[in-house]
Image (cartoon, helix red, strand yellow):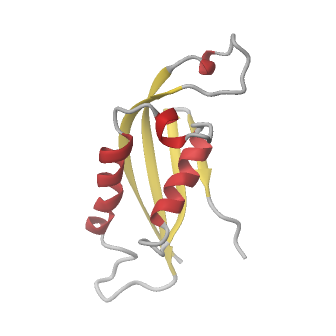
C-alpha cells in the first residue's frame, strides 16, 4: 500500500452550539486550521504516483474560496462546525474527484486534530 498526504491551511471563525454558556468554544472565536488530505493506492500510476500533488490544487481552491476568512457557522449550518464535522464535509466533497482519498484530518491547534476516515469494509 502506498500513501501520500498534503497539508492546506486556512483561517476562519466559528462558535459551537450545545455547550454551556461559560464554555469558551460557545463564543465566537477563530482558528488557523490545518487540513491534511490522505490518499492511498495499491498500485502506482504510470508516472509512479499515488496521485500527482498538482492535482490536489482543487482542495486548495475550495478551501481558499469557500472556507478561508469566513464564519464556518454560516457555511455548515445546521451542523456544528466542529473539527470532526469539517473533516467529514471535506471528505464528502473530494472523494468523488479523488478516489484514492481515504481520510481527512483537521487541526485547530498544533496539539489537536480530528480525522474522518470511513470504516473499512
Residue at left 60%, top 50%? Answer: 115
In depth, the one of 10 and 5 nearer the eye is: 10
- Which quadrant: the N terminus? bottom right
- Residue in the image at 62% along x and 41% along y: 79
Q: Residue at x 56, y 40 (%)?
A: 77
Q: Is residue 117 left or right of residue 38?
A: right
Q: Residue furthest left?
A: 54
- State whether residue 21 is above or below residue 119: above
User: Residue 68 falls in which quadrant of the image?
Assistant: top left
Look at the image and tell me in which quarter the C terminus lies.
bottom right
Give the x, y percent position of residue 58: 32, 61
Q: Is residue 6 left or right of residue 116?
A: left
Residue furthest bottom in the image: 46
Residue that sits furthest to the top in the current view: 22
The spot of residue 89 in percent (x, y) is 54, 53
Asked if residue 121 lies left or right of residue 70, the reply is right
Number of numbered callouts drawn: 0
85 in relation to 13, above or below: below
Residue 63 % position (x, y): 36, 48
**Up-down relation of residue 25 to residue 63 (above or below):** above
In the rendered image, residue 20, in percent from the top left (x then y), is placed at 73, 17
Which residue does the image show at 48% across and 75% down from the upper left? 99
Amino acid at each position: 500500500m502506498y500513501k501520500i498526504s498534503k497539508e492546506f491551511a486556512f483561517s476562519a471563525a466559528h462558535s459551537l452550539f450545545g455547550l454551556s454558556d461559560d464554555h469558551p468554544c460557545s463564543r465566537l472565536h477563530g482558528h488557523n486550521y490545518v487540513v491534511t488530505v490522505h490518499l492511498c493506492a495499491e498500485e502506482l500510476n504510470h508516472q509512479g504516483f499515488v496521485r500527482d500533488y498538482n492535482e490536489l490544487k482543487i482542495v486548495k481552491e475550495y478551501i481558499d474560496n469557500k472556507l478561508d476568512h469566513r464564519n464556518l457557522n454560516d457555511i455548515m449550518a445546521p451542523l456544528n462546525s466542529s473539527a470532526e464535522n469539517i473533516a467529514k464535509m471535506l471528505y464528502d466533497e473530494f472523494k468523488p474527484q479523488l478516489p484514492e482519498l481515504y481520510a481527512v484530518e483537521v487541526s485547530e491547534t498544533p496539539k489537536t486534530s480530528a480525522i474522518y476516515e470511513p470504516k473499512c469494509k
